[in-house]
Image (spheres, rainbow, N blue to C red):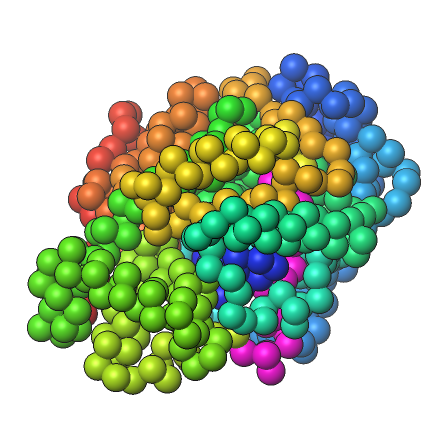
């Protein structure tokens, strides 16, 4: 399951349809402080040298900022450019790829400026290019930080405008209805296994040269090259969801290059969790947050008429699911498409009301609202290409970052067991990740995330009931990054906390970014406002 905003992921994913961001040159050239012990034991020293060479080259070249291409939909004064990085850092003079970056200058005075704040929204596979629009859109949560920082976004390697990868024809990828992710028989499982294997083969066929290099450590090295190209001696970084793991790996490989780092909604960085176990942990957390949403729907029965108890709302959900399984709604919305749509609610409570409203309309007899919300739009070729690309990058990075179980018996045992008590997401998530069991490219050992020389205090922000990145991940990173501080949003569960209005959290994030100061102890905050029906 991806850790950033879900798109309509209706895919061959594993076909379940699931479901499921020219001054200071001397400083910019400083060699990375990466060392073999911090890394993942696969030519780390060579790659550290390669990253230093690429960063020195980028510092010299800078970025040729221009108005953004019209089809990027990024209006002036946002500017766009490219940074060149090696495909393989062990061969820094070998094949190069281009990464798309954009920026908007700080809104304060020259004296107030503190450099660039670089953003990653998660995924893996998310684009960060919308980040400067927080300034042009006058987002009040980020107004203080924007005075001090240029807001810089980028598409990570393989994503969007940055040498994109693909695993399947995008229009095929979105076709619906997909098979029900919950298997009724061994034959259903065999069909899903075949789809997952074919998806992995498609990745190799369409993007094989990129696959061995689609790793989080390489994206962290890219981030350091971007830092150098920006003319920044040290990196200011905001990472959300998977962006927290990117930040954790960057902080491990380049501890002396971090100035400020905010990580929000944290992927558990333990080697034992990346990535197979992390996905199993998600299934448990999604079930809890799904129940939170049902409780809220029941409490607002006067608006939605879906039942006055969680059990009643669940019964309506199971009825909808059974109907869609028997005969897809509108001919296109089956159980896979339903999960893809409804999973927005456990992800973000900003989606609670809209999801409940569509459900309510359906129960009242309006099926079109559900079809409009959950079915793919085959005419949206650009959106479909983006969805397919995002899923390809998600799969490529998670499969390459770590060694996955290759025995189907392991997958079958673990997901069968979990599904009993956590049925909402378990099988959909399993099929989405199953291509990693037959992945055609080399799988690495994850970086051992830890504190290195020069790493400053990192600010960690996490909601207690997050479904996509369970709370334990924040606790684990807090232990590993000495001197870090953890802000816990108690009783809340939205994924991505720093963008929400919370008077206990927003000033602390601002204070850290503007002054570098952290609270003397960890902080527990009350939740942000509960959604209104």
Q: Which residue is drawn at 20% across and 48% down?
A: 527
Name the side, left or right, on which 430 lies relative to 155: left
From the image, which quarter does the C terminus lie in?
A: bottom left
Residue segment shown in magenta: 377-398
Asked if residue 266 is positioned above or below residue 45 in the image, the reply reads below
- State the residue in front, 1 or 232: 1
Residue 107 in sight in this render: no
- State the residue in front, 229 or 469: 469
Q: Residue 445 at what x, y percent from top left?
A: 65, 25
Residue 473 in sight in this render: yes
Name the side, left or right, on which 26 lies relative to 515: right
Magenta span main SS = helix
Name the side, left or right, on which 355 lies relative to 272: left
- State the residue in front, 366 or 183: 183
Residue 380 within the segment the image draws in magenta: yes
Asked if residue 73 is positioned above or below residue 266 in the image, the reply reads below
Q: Residue 468 at what x, y percent from top left?
A: 40, 46
């Amino acid at each position: 399951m991806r850790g950033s905003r879900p798109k309509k992921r209706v895919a061959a994913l594993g076909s379940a349809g699931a479901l499921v961001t020219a001054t200071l040159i001397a400083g910019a050239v400083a060699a990375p402080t990466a060392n073999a012990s911090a890394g993942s034991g696969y030519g780390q020293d060579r790659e550290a040298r390669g990253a230093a060479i690429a960063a020195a080259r980028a510092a010299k070249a800078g970025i040729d900022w221009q108005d953004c291409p019209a089809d990027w939909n990024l209006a002036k004064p946002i500017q766009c450019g490219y940074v060149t990085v090696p495909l393989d850092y062990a061969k820094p003079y070998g094949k190069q790829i281009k990464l798309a970056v954009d920026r908007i200058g700080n809104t304060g005075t020259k004296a107030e400026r503190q450099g660039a704040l670089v953003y990653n929204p998660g995924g893996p596979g998310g684009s960060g290019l919308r980040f400067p629009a927080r300034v042009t859109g006058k987002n009040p949560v980020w107004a203080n930080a924007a005075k001090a920082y240029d807001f810089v976004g980028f598409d990570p390697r393989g994503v969007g405008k940055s040498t994109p990868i693909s695993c399947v024809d995008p229009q095929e990828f979105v076709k619906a209805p997909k098979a029900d992710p919950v298997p009724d028989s061994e034959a259903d499982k065999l069909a899903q296994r075949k789809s997952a294997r074919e998806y992995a083969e498609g990745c190799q066929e369409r993007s094989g040269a990129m696959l061995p290099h689609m790793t989080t450590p390489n994206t962290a090295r890219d981030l350091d090259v971007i830092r150098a190209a920006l003319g920044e001696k040290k990196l200011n970084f905001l990472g959300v969801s998977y962006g927290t793991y990117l930040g954790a790996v960057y902080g491990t490989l380049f501890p002396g290059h971090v100035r400020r780092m905010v990580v929000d909604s944290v992927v558990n960085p333990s080697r034992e969790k990346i990535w197979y176990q992390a996905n199993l942990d998600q299934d448990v957390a999604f079930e809890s947050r799904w129940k939170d949403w049902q409780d809220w729907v029941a409490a607002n029965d006067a608006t939605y008429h879906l039942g006055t108890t969680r059990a009643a709302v669940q019964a309506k959900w199971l009825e909808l699911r059974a109907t869609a399984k028997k005969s897809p709604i509108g001919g296109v919305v089956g159980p896979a498409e339903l999960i893809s749509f409804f999973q927005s609610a456990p992800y973000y409570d900003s989606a609670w009301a809209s999801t409940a409203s569509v459900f309510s309309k359906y129960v009242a007899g309006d099926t079109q609202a559900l079809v409009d919300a959950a079915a793919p739009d085959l005419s949206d070729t650009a959106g479909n290409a983006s969805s397919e690309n995002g899923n390809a990058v998600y799969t490529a990075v998670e499969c390459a970052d770590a060694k996955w179980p290759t025995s189907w018996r392991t997958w079958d045992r673990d997901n069968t067991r979990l599904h009993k008590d956590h049925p909402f997401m378990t099988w959909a998530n399993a099929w989405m990740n199953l291509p990693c069991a037959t992945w055609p490219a080399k799988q690495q050992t994850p970086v051992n995330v830890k504190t290195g020389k020069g790493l400053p205090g990192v600010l960690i922000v996490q909601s207690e009931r997050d479904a996509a990145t369970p709370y334990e991940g924040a606790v684990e990173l807090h232990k590993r990054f000495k001197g870090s501080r953890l802000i816990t949003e108690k009783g809340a569960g939205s994924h991505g906390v720093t963008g929400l209005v919370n008077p206990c959290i927003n000033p602390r994030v601002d204070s850290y970014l503007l002054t570098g100061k952290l609270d003397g102890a960890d902080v527990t905050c009350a939740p942000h406002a509960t959604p209104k029906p």
